[in-house]
Image (spheres, rainbow, N blue to C red):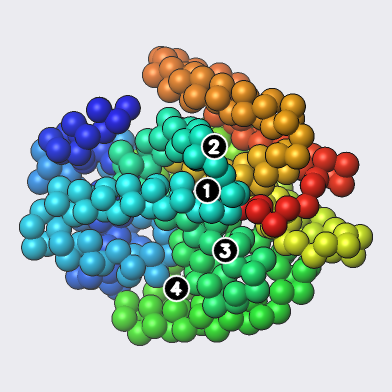
């Protein structure tokens, strides 16, 4: 995977097929025509121009829509400035270098927070580099590694009572809005008022600043258009999501625009409420006030029940999985079992790639959903007092 990745980066092979083209569409509009940032016709015209300049075919259905909130578009304008001055390949390589640095940072965070020795750190590094979603993030120029680093920082900052750092990390996580409700529910349940107040102040400042730069109606336009833009999402149908929504869409492919979506959204909101209730119960019953298990569960349910999440976003599972491994460290047998299963996980991603390459009807369940369900079960089990061993070194 690494050899193929470097070869594609250097040659610019099929750069037009990556999600980076979608991000460039949002960044270009934010930089040059912000009033049409969420106009489907404007996005299609800009995206087609980029793809033709790269010499590639257009996406299926012409448009692979930019669905991220306005501050995400504004935050990436510096990369589009590079693309305007040089070319899109140069901007992609700059962001690829940033992603490699973020991957290294993720390994360092894991080592520091878990107190790993050299051999254990090597295992984590090899496991991450061999993790297919990490490869997809690097190959497509996605934001998942940035979100994973932000998630690690957020969990640790809340535990250390560093409200500003926690709020800043939460702002980065808001690039992927479906992740937020379970986290907010846990913060409310735990009465983390300083973090919530700081996040509210920072969020208000960012919203006002974004509106002042991109237009005062940009947030309202985003809320109006995001649903219809997702329906024009080229090949990005819900059946390709390793989530509850994807599972339901595969079971009833003709109904994904109606009842399946309603069930998925209700499950997403219900999971946020459940995470908050569990955090409240644990806070009252536990003698040790440690929010990291609660936030690990919030991230896990946020990923599994998310109404919009694809394979590259599975990188974020590294945070709840870190909690699982740390909770098992006191039991060498349990830790070895967890490690052996994790070493088997690349098989699921190979099966997923094979399944997507086969013609005809897809399997009833996405192979990538199986390890996600297993990880969610592990997180829930790790929260049980009989398995959980409190540690200062929880990542």
Gap between marks 1 and 3 measured at Cα: 16 Å
Gap between marks 1 and 2 measured at Cα: 8 Å
Q: Secondary structure at mark 1?
A: helix
Q: Which residue is mark 4?
A: 219
Q: Choose mark 4 or mark 1, whichever is in front.
A: 1
Which tag, 4 or 2, sits closer to the chain's start?
2
Q: Residue at x 30, y 30 (%)?
A: 2
Q: Which residue is mark 3?
A: 154
Q: Are marks 4 and 2 in contact (CB under 8 Å)?
A: no
Q: Secondary structure at mark 4?
A: helix
Outermost residue, top direction?
359
Q: Choose mark 2 or mark 3, whichever is in front.
A: 2
Q: Which mark is residue 120?
A: 2
Q: Secondary structure at mark 2?
A: helix
Pick the front one: 91 or 321:
321
Q: Which mark is residue 111?
A: 1
Which tag, 1 or 3, sits closer to the chain's start?
1
Indicate the position of residue 273 as horizontal and vertical percent values: 77, 58
Does 141 sit above or below residue 365? Answer: below
Gap between marks 3 and 4 measured at Cα: 25 Å
Gap between marks 4 and 2 measured at Cα: 45 Å
């Amino acid at each position: 995977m690494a050899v193929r990745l470097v070869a594609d980066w250097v040659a610019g092979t099929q750069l037009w097929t990556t999600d980076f083209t979608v991000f460039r569409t949002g960044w270009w509009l934010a930089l040059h025509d912000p009033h049409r940032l969420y106009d489907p016709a404007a996005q299609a015209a800009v995206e087609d121009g980029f793809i033709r300049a790269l010499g590639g075919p257009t996406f299926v259905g012409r448009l692979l829509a930019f669905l991220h909130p306005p501050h995400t578009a504004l935050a990436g304008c510096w990369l589009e400035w590079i693309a305007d001055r040089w070319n899109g390949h140069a901007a992609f390589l700059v962001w690829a270098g940033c992603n490699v640095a973020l991957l290294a940072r993720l390994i360092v965070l894991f080592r520091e927070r878990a107190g790993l020795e050299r051999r254990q750190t090597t295992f984590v590094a090899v496991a991450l580099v061999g993790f297919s979603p990490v490869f997809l993030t690097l190959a497509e120029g996605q934001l998942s590694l940035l979100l994973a680093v932000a998630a690690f920082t957020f969990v640790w900052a809340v535990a250390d009572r560093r409200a500003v750092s926690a709020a800043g990390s939460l702002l980065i996580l808001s690039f992927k809005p479906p992740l937020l409700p379970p986290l907010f529910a846990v913060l409310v349940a735990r009465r983390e008022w300083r973090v919530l107040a700081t996040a509210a102040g920072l969020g208000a400042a960012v919203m006002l600043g974004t509106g002042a730069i991109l237009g005062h109606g940009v947030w309202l336009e985003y809320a109006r258009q995001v649903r219809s833009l997702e329906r024009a999402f080229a090949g990005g149908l819900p059946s390709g999501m390793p989530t509850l929504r994807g599972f339901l869409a595969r079971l009833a492919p003709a109904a994904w625009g109606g009842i399946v979506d309603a069930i998925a959204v209700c499950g997403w909101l219900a999971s946020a409420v459940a995470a908050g209730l569990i955090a409240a119960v644990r806070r009252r019953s536990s003698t040790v006030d440690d929010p990291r298990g609660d936030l690990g569960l919030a991230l896990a349910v946020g990923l599994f029940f998310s109404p919009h999440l694809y394979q590259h976003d599975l990188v974020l599972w590294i945070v709840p999985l870190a909690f699982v491994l740390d909770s098992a460290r006191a039991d060498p047998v349990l830790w070895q079992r967890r490690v052996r299963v994790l070493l088997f996980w690349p098989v699921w991603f190979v099966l997923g790639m094979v399944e997507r390459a086969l013609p005809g009807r897809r399997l009833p369940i996405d192979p990538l959903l199986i390890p996600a369900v297993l990880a969610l079960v592990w997180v829930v089990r790790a929260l049980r007092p009989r398995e959980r061993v409190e540690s200062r070194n929880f990542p």
